Image (cartoon, helix red, strand yellow):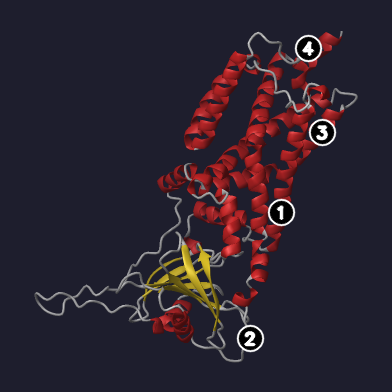
Amino acid sequence: MATRIESTTSPPRATGWRGLSLRFHFYAGVLVGPFILIAALSGVLYAATPQMESWIYSDQLRAPVGLNQASLADQVKAAQAAHPGGDLVAVRPAPEPGDTTRVLFAEEGLGESERRAVFVDPATAQVRGDLVAYGSSGALPFRTTLDQLHRNLLLGEPGRLYSELAASWLWAVALGGLVLWVSRRRARRAEKTESARGKSVRRHGSVGLWVLLGALFLSATGLTWSAYAGENVSALRESLGWETPALKVTGGDEHAGHAGHGEAPAAPAPAKPESVDAMLASARAAGIDAASVEIGLPTKPGAPWQVAEIERGWPTQVDAVAVDGTTGQILGEVRFADYPLMAKLARWGIDAHMGVLFGWPNQLVLLVLGAGLVTLVVLGYRMWWRRRPTRATGLTFGRPIPRGQWRKAPPWLLVGLLVLAAAIGWFVPLLGISLLAFLVIDLLLGLRSRGKSTPDSTDVTV
């Protein structure tokens, strides 16, 4: 009778579904779990950096509020006097009373995307310090270190493989766990009692269900930054017209005229820092109204200035204009309101991933999500450890899900999974390569253990 009940509640086809999912989820979780754990912990730390950065660098970031304010030109001159060896590239005026102005320089010896930031008191035009700023976010050294830890474990370009592996597998592990949760929920309805391991599995599944959407979001947005899958994402966006619009000069004459017949045009004069106030005024008149902006100096003589909003909160303010350095005329503009929908979603997704879209609520969500991912990994390894055969075996690892689960699955399922895996593996290369490596290793281990007794099939029913 017991055999008939087992056959009724767990038909072979259902067992194939569940056994295949269990084996995939087991290997993915065990082998990729450390990458996900490190990414979650470092990501939580990075999300909290705005407050920590403000405290650590308060001397540079904050200044007493004064009744009067020096012109931007005077602030730039003070920064240039303090650092005469750098090439002035941009200015970020103080966004709020009590904040300092950042004057940005390019210097030899700095890394890619790094600039020297000189902090100037807007009221007195006195320099309050200098630090290396990284990227468009202007991250200072502490936040930059955590950013690189999260991105590449401070190992440079080779270290990015870790974060791409984590992002590539996170969605697959999450969806595999959802399949198992649904199938186990159906099986539990027929159970009268629940084992200790069953309770652990249920807790693991419940936490996974709560963080499922967040895990899928972090995986998708993380892949946009990755080295290999990121290239495919960029190519896809380009082919579908989903790219972020670039600022282009659509008007004005960049000294194309001739002084006389047969004469070469006069070389345009280089941009003068004294013009920074006028360039900002022109941009403000053109609708650049965010508190935080960056005024970019021309990259070559005769090229326009660029003034861009850098507010990444809600509402998003990232409009930008090109300004003629001689006349103050607006030569081009790009507005966030005119972005394609997918470009807007990409912008919001990246900013939410960084914890800046909604301020501290965004940070709190990332904190809870990161804690949930850490809990999932720890519970998963705990269940794996408890599967070891006996305590007498000492430091023996837990048993894997028995081999041969694919034989129990229907052929149409196997064919569909192979096609899907090939397509996803091409688009997300590290997932495809690592999955193939897992299969080869598993095959070799299977050949090595051929002839040995296999674990009890009841392992796949919990």
**82 relative position to 263: left or right:** right
In primary-sequence order, the first of circles 3 and 1 is 3
**390 relative position to 437: left or right:** right
- Most foreground residue, 308 or 354: 354
In primary-sequence order, the first of circles 1 and 2 is 2
Amino acid type at circle 3 is Ser
The kind of secondary structure element at disc 3 is helix
Tell me if residue 326 comes above or below residue 8 in the rendering: below
Task: Report the Cα–Cα distance between label 3 and label 1.
Answer: 23 Å
| Residue 248 screen position, x and y as percent | 36, 64
Amino acid type at circle 4 is Ser
**380 relative position to 295: left or right:** right
Residue labelled with disc 3? 200
Task: Report the Cα–Cα distance between label 4 and label 2.
Answer: 78 Å
| Residue 317 screen position, x and y as percent | 54, 67
Amino acid type at circle 2 is Val
Residue labelled with disc 2? 65
Q: Quadrant of residue 275?
A: bottom left
- How many other residues sit within 10 Å of disc 2, few (<14), some (14-19) or many (≥20)? some
Amino acid type at circle 1 is Leu
Residue located farthest toward the left when viewing the structure as drawn = 262
| Residue 110 screen position, x and y as percent | 45, 63
Asked if the residue at tag 1 contacts the one at tag 3, i.e. Cβ–Cβ closer than 8 Å, the answer is no
